Image (spheres, rainbow, N blue to C red):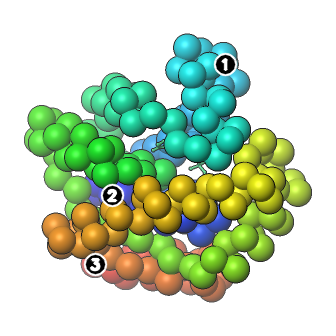
Amino acid sequence: MKLVLLGPPGVGKGTQAVNVKEHFNIVHLSTGDILRSEVKAETDLGKQAKSFMDAGKLVPDELLLQMMDARLRKPDCDPGYLLDGFPRTIPQADGLEQLLEAMGHKLDAVISITANEEELINRLVLRGKTSGRSDDTPEVIRQRLEVYRRQTEPLLDFYSSRKQLKEVDGIGDIPEITERILEVLK
Ligand code: ADP
């Protein structure tokens, strides 16, 4: 099973990703998590990514595409994967499409989890109190939502026109939303 999880910050992608990857026994690739570990390890990539992340901006497409090219070619990805936080821009989606084609892979579906903006802000502010993430402050949250609307939302049309998009309502309790996701994948 090869999946992409799309949705605004705070919609619960990370939480749902864990449940979905366990269900299908596939790897969960969260670009946010991968980048945060690169920052922590002070690698070249981490050093380049940090300032963008702290400002709530996107790390340049070129860096993400290189990183994901290397990652998706590892053997643990052969049985399937769940991409969480990537692609996030049209150039990344184009790059991913080319990469998948080169590897002879095909996405089974792109799941878009939705929630209204008020709910998202409430959840992110709440998470910011305990997450310790440098980008979970009200100012940076606003910026991330703005970046989502401008740069990531166009992917809904991109995947919808390819008949790959499945929408799932992200309001409800966690197991209920997982069920909705598994249902649209049947
Ligand atoms: P959220 O979805 O809650 O905003 P993530 O953990 O997915 O958080 O990402 C955190 C930050 O990592 C983003 O704001 C961005 O700076 C960087 N990032 C993650 N994925 C990508 C990507 N595909 N392209 C560019 N930047 C990314």
* Residue 91 figure quarter: top left
In this figure, which residue is indicated by the disc labeled 2? Answer: 3
Dot 1, crowdedness within 10 Å: few (<14), some or many (≥20)? few
**Is residue 115 rendered to the left or right of residue 39?**
left
Q: Is residue 142 above or below residue 28?
A: below
Residue matched to label 1: 41
Identify the residue shown where x is 64% and y is 46%. 56
Q: Closer to the observer: label 2 or label 3? A: 2
Q: How many marks?
A: 3
In the rendered image, the vertical position of residue 70 relative to residue 58, given as above or below = above
Q: Earlier in the sequence, mark 1 or mark 2?
A: 2
Please report the residue visible at 58 percent of the width from the left and 28 percent of the height from the top. Answer: 49
**Label 3 sits on what residue type?**
Lys
Question: Quadrant of the image for the N terminus?
Answer: bottom left
Q: CA distance from mark 2 to mark 3?
A: 13 Å
Q: Secondary structure at mark 3?
A: loop
Amino acid type indicated by mark 1: Ala
Quote the CA–CA distance across marks 1 and 3.
40 Å
Question: Which image quarter: residue 13?
Answer: bottom right
Q: Nearer the viewer, residue 46 or 166?
A: 46
Label 3 sits on residue: 186
Q: Is residue 100 above or below residue 109?
A: above
Query: Residue 52 versus residue 105: which sits nearer the camera?
Result: 52
**Image location of residue 88, percent across then percent down:** 42, 51
**Ligand 1 near label 1 (Cβ, under 8 Å)?**
no
Q: Earlier in the sequence, mark 1 or mark 3?
A: 1
Mark 1 lies on a secondary structure that is loop
Q: Earlier in the sequence, mark 2 or mark 3?
A: 2
